[in-house]
């Protein structure tokens, strides 16, 4: 009897068709319509075998579960998981949590990166009674975005600029050795890396996958430091933009792994080189009009735009632990390496925490430059939106103010964050204490002074690197 081969018939689409399908899916923004259409697709497409459900913990680390398609369609109103196994979620005695699927996030996945026959959705977290879970900032951001649109007609938009490094070897973060450090894969740099250099091939592969997933890339390029890269994708609503931040990092890590390398988003993986940032380009629209633009305003920014900047600068030290949430992220805030640690705004000075890029009626925006790529994007944008739309504008002083800078280490940031009434009201006492618990635990595992050498602890106990085994070895 002849042996049967190639029996698997899972969904495999070309990158061109993937892009068309994903761009079409993005147009379905009504939750009920999205659920109706995408569940119908799952029933119709027999070659789809599984749905990957993504969600995010309190520190911003991506988690995922693969559900059999038929099971998910039958049980999507009762998708439970053990929250006690995830940092920052429920305690052991109240471990059951629920996944509430956001069907507007439906995405077709490239098979050569994610495996054949899979699609993806993001989910918000609910408690056992079905109420929104207070430690899930994706859900809180989405709820607030809907509330502010309904009550004030305001919509937030964001485009990130995310930097990373590609390093020699697989999983080198989890096996970091202090004397040896990380090894860059190339000596090329900004704008002049060779076309078929490992870094350039990696960047090209990432760009192709992101386009197929509907990211609408704008540009992809090597950054200033050797082995450093950056990708930019187009403006979109704040929740989708945060989803894209996490998917982008996942894609980079998987492609690097396939190439025998590691993609890292540690803020400062190599001492003596520029660090990694995640510049946040933020704008607000009302009835489709960008309210940050004013042709006659200073730097073409409106009065509302300047008020938002003033409020962000006023809260800078209090929210530093949100923008820079790891021990390693304060090593990046070094003025010798173009770090934006100065609490001021400028159209040109890249050492400023906030910059006003050149813009027109469509592109006028505020660029927050001091954010590290390991920040929880949902908590970050929730904070920015709350400041922009609810915080009281500080009174301007006529006296010349001295230059202020962001905290120089995580211990100072923790003190400012803990003492802030604003962050308590922002997050709620229970959630704030939970967030602080993990930041303090990480700080305790590190020396108080950063020094000139990157320590093993700041890598191994970093919230995007550590695992149960590593954490327990302290």
Image (cartoon, grey):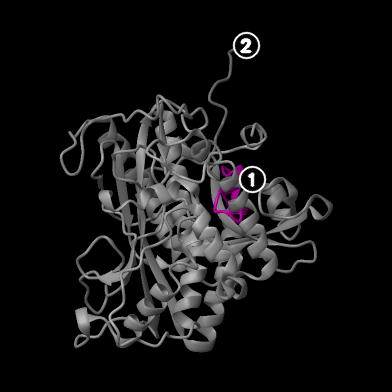
Q: Nearer the viewer, residue 156 or 104?
A: 156
Assign the N terminus to one quadrant of the image.
Answer: top right
In percent of the image, x 61 and y 75: which residue is there? 425
Residue 435 rendering spot, x and y as whole percentages: 62, 58
Quick one: SS at disc 1? strand
Q: Is residue 389 highlighted in magenta?
A: no
| Image x and y of residue 67, in percent | 66, 46
Report which residue position mark 1 lands on. Answer: 65
Q: Is residue 55 magenta?
A: yes
Residue 411 at x, y percent in the picture: 52, 54
Q: Is residue 129 left or right of residue 73?
A: right
Sequence order check, earlier mark of 1 and 2:
2
Q: How much space separates mark 1 and mark 2, taking CA atoms?
A: 39 Å
Q: How many marks?
A: 2
Residue indicated by mark 2: 1
Judge depth for marks 1 and 2 and give the one in front: 1
Q: Looking at the image, is 242 positioned above or below residue 347?
A: above
**On the picture, is 298 further left or further right than 46?**
left
Q: Nearer the viewer, residue 231 or 374?
A: 374
Numbered range of the magenta stretch: 42-65
């Amino acid at each position: 009897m002849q042996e049967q081969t190639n029996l698997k018939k899972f969904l495999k689409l070309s990158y061109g068709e993937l892009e068309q399908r994903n761009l079409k899916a993005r147009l379905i923004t009504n939750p009920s319509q999205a659920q109706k259409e995408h569940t119908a697709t799952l029933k119709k497409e027999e070659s789809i075998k599984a749905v990957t459900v993504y969600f995010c913990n309190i520190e911003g680390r991506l988690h995922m579960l693969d559900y059999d398609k038929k099971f998910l369609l039958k049980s999507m109103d009762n998708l439970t998981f053990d929250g006690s196994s995830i940092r920052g979620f429920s305690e052991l005695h109240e471990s059951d949590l629920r996944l509430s699927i956001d069907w507007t996030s439906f995405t077709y996945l490239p098979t050569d990166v994610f495996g054949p026959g899979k699609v993806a959705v993001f989910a918000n977290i609910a408690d056992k009674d079905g109420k929104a879970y207070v430690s899930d900032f994706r859900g809180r951001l989405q709820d607030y975005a809907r509330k502010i649109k309904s009550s004030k007609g305001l919509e937030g938009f964001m485009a990130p600029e995310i930097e990373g490094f590609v390093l020699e070897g697989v999983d080198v973060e989890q096996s970091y050795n202090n004397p040896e450090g990380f090894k860059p894969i190339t000596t090329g740099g900004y704008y002049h890396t060779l076309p078929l250099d490992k870094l350039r091939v990696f960047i090209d592969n990432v760009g192709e996958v992101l386009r197929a997933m509907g990211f609408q890339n704008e540009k992809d390029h090597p950054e200033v430091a050797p082995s450093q890269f950056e990708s930019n994708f187009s403006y979109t609503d704040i929740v989708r933009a945060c989803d894209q931040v996490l998917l982008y990092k996942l894609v980079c890590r998987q492609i690097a792994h396939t190439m025998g390398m590691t993609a890292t988003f540690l803020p400062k993986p190599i001492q003596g080189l520029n660090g990694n940032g995640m510049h946040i380009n933020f704008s607000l629209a009302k009835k489709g009009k960008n309210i940050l633009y004013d042709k006659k305003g200073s730097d073409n920014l409106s009065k509302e735009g300047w008020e938002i900047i003033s409020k962000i600068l006023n809260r800078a030290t209090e929210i530093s632990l949100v923008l820079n949430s790891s021990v390693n992220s304060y090593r990046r805030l070094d003025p010798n390496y173009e770090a934006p640690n100065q609490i001021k705004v400028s159209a040109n000075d890249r050492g400023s925490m906030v910059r006003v890029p050149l813009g027109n009626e469509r592109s006028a925006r505020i660029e927050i430059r001091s954010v590290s790529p390991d920040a929880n994007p949902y908590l970050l944008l929730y904070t920015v939106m709350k400041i922009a739309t609810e915080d009281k504008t500080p009174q301007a002083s006529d006296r010349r103010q001295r230059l202020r800078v962001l905290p120089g280490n995580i211990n100072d940031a923790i003190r400012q964050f803990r003492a802030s009434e604003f962050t308590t009201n922002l997050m709620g006492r229970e959630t704030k204490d939970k967030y602080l618990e993990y930041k303090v635990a990480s700080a305790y595992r590190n020396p108080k002074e950063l020094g000139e050498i990157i320590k093993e602890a700041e890598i191994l106990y970093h919230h995007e690197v550590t695992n149960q085994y590593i954490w327990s070895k302290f």
